[in-house]
């Protein structure tokens, strides 16, 4: 088959590779219904991570099981499944504690920007639907796999609850999903920090009650003004840069919580600053598996339409253009039709 | 009167100063029943903080109100009171949120290592007892003011709950109070990291179920062994040094919580390390005011005896020796009789 490989910064190719095979008895092979490009794929694309060998790209996926290893018990060929970008056994103590993204057997999914993919630890990673969903459900189910799951975790990590005041730092796809999650979790006020009109529009559609265009000190001042000088109880940090983290710390009230889901790049914290800010913090790769059944249900019931975050749809053969569009911020998130 | 001043590192003197006066209408003057030396007083004593002018030392206190400013409503002369080392109005949004240590009017108490002291923001800071407590209650009430309040906050910040596995890093007075707090909050297992026999003994008396003497990587390995490789759900960090913080991060399970109450000195965090550790963190100066009524009740009911943490009692005129004994770790915590 063909699949997406990254050979170096800016160098993404759709090229011939070997078909995926069952390598371990706990593997499954799925035929993807659709796949997509993640904001985190842009880190190596932009040269922020070292690339030593061609990377098999893609970790967001949903599709139909076509083969399973002899030890797989919970999914079977013909079923529609969604999985997390973190592969987990879902039985170890960390999984049972709801942190499947720190599973003792954790691996990160790869190779999903392709028509077929191998999913290790299939029993612990994949969740099957009862019936084959309609085609129009596919973008929404795909979004659950990472971008919604990550935004959701950001909101949960930030302690969002009924009536809470929430600020979302970052108007990328994860930030927008953070807005949707905050809304679903009952937030009373959702302030989205965004300076791009199309993203502001989506943020409002997903539940944002206020938009703050300013950044840095001005952005902090604006949020403080909107919150009567108090700051927000919950802040979702969905970027991972020094500036965005300082922004989050500048607008979170003492005793409030920052959920940070952008992988930090070049970010460090001063212990005494953290101490006197007195903000609760929880970050990490999202334990999407914890949320999968609930989020899949919300999609199937029509309560949420996270697939709206895909504002560019391309045939997978044009994956390179999909990366380029996201890198140049012409697209929020690119879905790839296989 | 005489009071305790620090003129420079290692230079503590009990010398003549002006009597404290009501300076603002919200002030109270108290006659101290006893006072004590805090672990944090050792930072400037050891030269870790700059000292530009003589410091009026002392921020842990209980005693009898002798005078109040014209706006003070909730306490009156003759009442026995305990206050927090953080002065707060107890009415601002941060106070109402339970974070009085980030009160918009916050000041830090000073000058309490003396027979009399001025307490600003008396209404928001002081809590009076219904009756004059017996003399033997004084050490326990004094401990509530900071050292127990801080250990308690460490346990609350670390999310300690019924049945939880808790590790306390640091066997100073605050760490020992963290053990007591964890026990009171229902922890199922309390692992105290301590290499000093007298402190181990107190830790066991306060509720520690296990003692780990090892430090650094060996200490981490020992705790991981005790927790079946999982790590602890709640970690109280009560030191504030790089090594102790790394210890805390090494033994906290993913999704677990570190409550850090040692003021960080020379501690910094790498964003990506924090992210992938996936531990919840909350630190800061303890909002003791939130806990005061509850902790004072527990003392008066005889449920806890936090004053046992004072293993050296000196007349206040010998305060310099009190500092020296703590600096040389001959004493855990020095109480000063006024």
Image: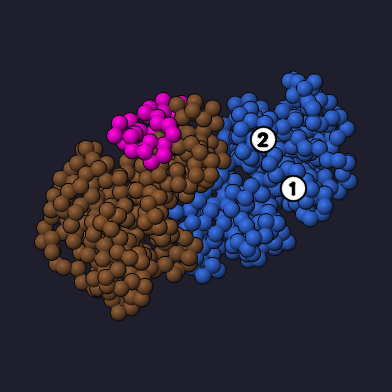
Chain colours: A brown, B blue
Furthest residue toward left: A16
Residue A72 seen in the figure: yes
As drawn, A24 above or below A50: below
Q: Residue A171 vs residue A30: left or right?
A: right
For this view, does A150 lie left or right of residue B166?
left
- Which callout, 1 or 2, points to the residue nearer the camera? 1
* Residue beneath the point at 70% across and 44% down: B291
The quarter of the picture where the C terminus of chain A appears is: bottom left
**Residue at 59% across / 53% down in the picture?**
B159
**Residue A241 quadrant:** top left
Q: Residue at x 81, y 31 (%)?
A: B75
Q: Out of B319 and B248, give the one closest to the viewer.
A: B248
Residue in the picture at 37% in, 28% down: A213
> Compared to A34, does A163 lie above or below?
above
Question: For residue B302, which quarter of the picture?
Answer: bottom right
Q: Is A196 covered by the magenta stretch?
A: yes
What residue occupies the far bottom of the structure in this picture?
A70
| Residue A283 lies in the magenta stretch | no
Left or right: B257 with respect to B126?
left
The residue tagged 1 is B295
Residue under label 2, please give it.
B86
Instruction: Give the letter of the chain under mark 2.
Output: B
Would residue B87 be visible to someone looking at this image? no
Chain containing mark 1: B
Picture coordinates of residue B29, whole percent (x, y): 80, 28
Query: How busy is the neighbourhood of tag 1: few (under 14 within 10 Å), some, or many (20 plus)?
Result: many
Q: What are the residue bounds of the magenta stretch?
A: A193-221
Q: Residue A62, percent across and down?
A: 28, 60
């Amino acid at each position: 088959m063909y699949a997406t490989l990254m050979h170096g910064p800016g160098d993404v190719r759709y090229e011939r590779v070997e078909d995926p095979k069952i390598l371990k008895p706990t593997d499954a092979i799925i035929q993807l219904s659709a796949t997509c490009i993640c904001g985190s794929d842009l880190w190596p694309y932009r040269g922020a991570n070292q690339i030593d060998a061609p990377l098999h790209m893609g970790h967001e996926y949903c599709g139909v099981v076509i083969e399973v290893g002899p030890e797989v018990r919970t999914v079977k060929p013909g079923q529609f499944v969604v999985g997390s970008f973190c592969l987990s056994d879902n039985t170890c103590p960390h999984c049972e504690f709801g942190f499947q993204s720190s599973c003792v057997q954790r691996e990160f999914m790869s190779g999903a920007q392709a028509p077929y993919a191998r999913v290790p630890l299939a029993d612990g990673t994949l969740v099957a639907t009862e019936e084959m969903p309609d085609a129009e459900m596919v973008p929404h189910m795909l979004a659950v796999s990472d971008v919604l799951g990550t935004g959701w975790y950001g909101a949960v990590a930030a302690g969002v609850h009924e009536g809470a005041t929430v600020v979302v730092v970052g108007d990328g796809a994860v930030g927008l999903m953070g807005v949707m999650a905050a809304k679903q979790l009952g937030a009373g006020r959702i302030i989205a920090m965004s300076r791009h009109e199309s993203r502001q529009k989506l943020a409002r559609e997903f539940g944002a009650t206020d938009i703050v265009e300013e950044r840095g000190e001005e952005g902090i001042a604006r949020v403080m003004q909107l919150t009567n000088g108090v700051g927000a109880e919950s802040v979702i940090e969905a970027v991972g840069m020094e500036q965005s983290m300082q922004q989050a710390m500048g607008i979170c009230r003492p005793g409030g919580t920052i959920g940070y889901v952008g992988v930090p790049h070049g970010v460090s914290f001063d212990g005494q600053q953290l101490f006197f800010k007195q903000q609760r913090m929880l970050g990490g790769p999202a334990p999407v598996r914890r949320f999968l059944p609930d989020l899949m249900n919300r999609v199937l019931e029509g309560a949420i339409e996270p697939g709206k975050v895909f504002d560019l749809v391309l045939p997978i053969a044009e994956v390179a253009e999909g990366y380029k569009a996201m890198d140049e911020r012409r697209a929020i998130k690119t879905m790839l039709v296989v």
